[in-house]
Amino acid sequence: MILTVTPNPSLDRTYEIPTLERGAVLRATADRIDPGGKGVNVSRAVAAAGHRTLAVLPLGGPAGAALGDLLAAEGIEVAGVPVAGQTRSNISAVEPDGTLTKINAAGPELSADESRALLETVRTRSAGADWIACCGSLPRGLAPSWYAELVAQVHQAGARIALDTSGPSLTAALAARPDVVKPNAEELAQAVGRPLRTVGDAVEAARDLRKLGAGAVLASLGADGQLLVDADGERFASARVATVRSNVGAGDASLAGFLAAGGVGVRALASAVAYGAAAVQLPGSAMPAPMDLDPSAVLVGDTVPVGLELREPAG
Ligand SMILES: Nc1ncnc2c1ncn2[C@@H]1O[C@H](COP(=O)(O)OP(=O)(O)OP(=O)(O)O)[C@@H](O)[C@H]1O
Ligand SMILES: [Mg+2]
């Protein structure tokens, strides 16, 4: 079972519009509502792969109730923590050429009691979880040390933690020794405070995160692929993709693929890349199902191409 934690989830509304015109009333040609949030995405992909998953998240107001219902309809168990504020609604406008404009709301501020209740729910529901995936930024009211506290508590209960966050909440959590962290290139550069120009730079940065406490580092390097640095050394994998439709949520899909394949070693790395490659070929933040995957497109290198220049340098 894979438990996910999404401290600041959303109800995502997407409108298809002919063209984005400032100051005008725009008529949508289609619209849809999807569950949103990085841990929620991991749960969706894990559930689609046929694994049991439990999504722990704060839920407030009508948007929170609707989010809980949408997740349940996808076969995801939900442990909602009631909060006084309203779960946020994020708005996306998509034009026919694929251009995406997003408005993300801040989300509710959690009280000290709600912050404790969220942590307590993770702790009590973590029995039997193979992995706990903690994903995304923290809402107002949760201290930057909140993930660090979570890691410490959950380790006492014997579960493994995968953490996908950035900035101070990532830095603070490293000392609590998360089993896996999944930064993208920008997040990795920020965590070590230096730019990344090559895959070799990313290897050095990932080694530094291990020295700071991460058990393994799964670094996603956008179109270049992914790097796994763990106690056994370094491995690199990539996949060719013909047409990229949307890279939104590709990192979340990758983490889901990594954990669904056991969360350890080169087999999990290959699965992460297969999931990332499948995700970018789907619209919006749609998560891949097993039939969307093409494992034969994944190349796992015998060596890490340390000299390879990143297509998108970071930092
Ligand atoms: N343009 C691309 N072509 C091929 N594969 C891609 C491309 N972009 C992303 N991927 C695949 O998806 C993985 C994750 O992408 P990325 O590093 O952009 O994650 P991310 O920034 O964490 O995304 P998000 O947080 O939005 O989910 C990459 O490592 C790669 O395997
Ligand atoms: Mg990401």
Image (cartoon, rainbow, N blue to C red):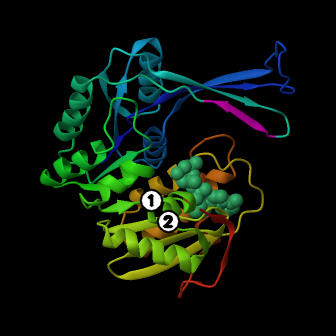
Question: Image check: 76 left or right of 183?
Answer: left
- Label 2: which residue? 219
Is residue 188 or residue 91 the one in the foreground?
188
Identified by mark 2, the residue type is Ala
- Label 1: which residue? 182
Q: Give the mark nearest the N terminus, 1 or 2.
A: 1
Q: Is residue 102 highlighted in magenta?
A: yes
Is residue 111 or residue 274 the one in the foreground?
111
Identified by mark 1, the residue type is Lys
Is residue 288 visible to us here?
no
| Label 1 packing within 10 angstroms: few (<14), some (14-19), many (20+) | many
**Could you tell me residue 100's position as x and y percent?**
74, 37
Q: Main secondary structure of the magenta part?
A: strand
Image point (49%, 36%), residue name: 37
Structural distance between the alpha carbons of marks 1 and 2: 5 Å
Q: Is residue 191 highlighted in magenta?
A: no
Magenta segment boundaries in residue numbering = 98-103
Image point (35%, 43%), residue name: 4
Say which quarter of the image contains residue 5.
Answer: top left
Instruction: Determine whether 17 is above or below 287 in the image.
Output: above
Find out if the beta carbon at label 2 lies less than 8 Å from the nearest ligand 1 atom: no
Look at the numbered disc 2 and give the secondary structure of its residue: strand
**Could you tell me residue 109's position as x and y percent?**
38, 23
